[in-house]
Image: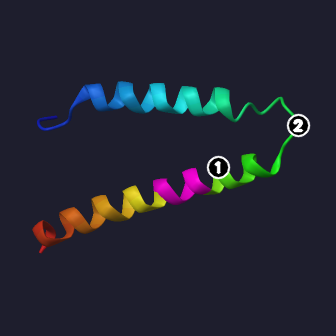
Amino acid sequence: MPGIDNYAHAGGFAGGYLMGLWLDPLRPERVDHLAWAVGCIAATALAIAASFFTILPYMF
């Protein structure tokens, strides 16, 4: 697909892997685990919203 950079997929994989190591699910949970998890979910939601609003003018 034109315009899709596969290096971004590799970066997303690497970032997800590193966050998985940092937020190790086998360690007992701490308060900062929850804060970082909520932050990651919020960042994901913002990225999805930004991509939607970026393409919205081209849809109509």
Residue furthest to the front in view is: 32
Q: Nearer the viewer, residue 28 or 2?
A: 28
Is residue 3 part of the magenta span, yes or no?
Answer: no
The amino acid type of the residue labelled 2 equals Pro
Q: Nearer the viewer, residue 41 or 52?
A: 41
Q: Position of residue 33 (x, y in %)?
A: 74, 46
Badge number at residue 28:
2
Q: Specify whether 11 is left or right of 57.
A: right
- First in sequence, mark 2 or 1: give its number: 2
Magenta span dominant secondary structure: helix
Q: Nearer the viewer, residue 54 or 42?
A: 42
Residue furthest to the bottom in view is: 60
User: Label 2 neighbourhood size at 10 Å, few (<14), some (14-19), many (20+)?
Assistant: few
Q: Position of residue 45 (x, y in %)?
A: 47, 60
The answer to whether residue 58 is above or below residue 31 is below
The amino acid type of the residue labelled 1 equals Trp
Q: Give the residue number, with chain letter if any, for mark 1.
A: 36
Quarter of the picture containing the C terminus is: bottom left
Q: Quadrant of residue 57?
A: bottom left
Q: Position of residue 22 (x, y in %)?
A: 66, 31
Q: Quadrant of residue 12?
A: top left
Disc 2 is placed on an element classified as loop
Q: Specify whether 46 is left or right of 27.
A: left
Q: Residue at x 42, y 62 (%)?
A: 46
Q: Are marks 2 and 1 in contact (CB under 8 Å)?
A: no
Q: Identify the magenta region.
A: 39-44
Q: Position of residue 49 (x, y in %)?
A: 37, 65
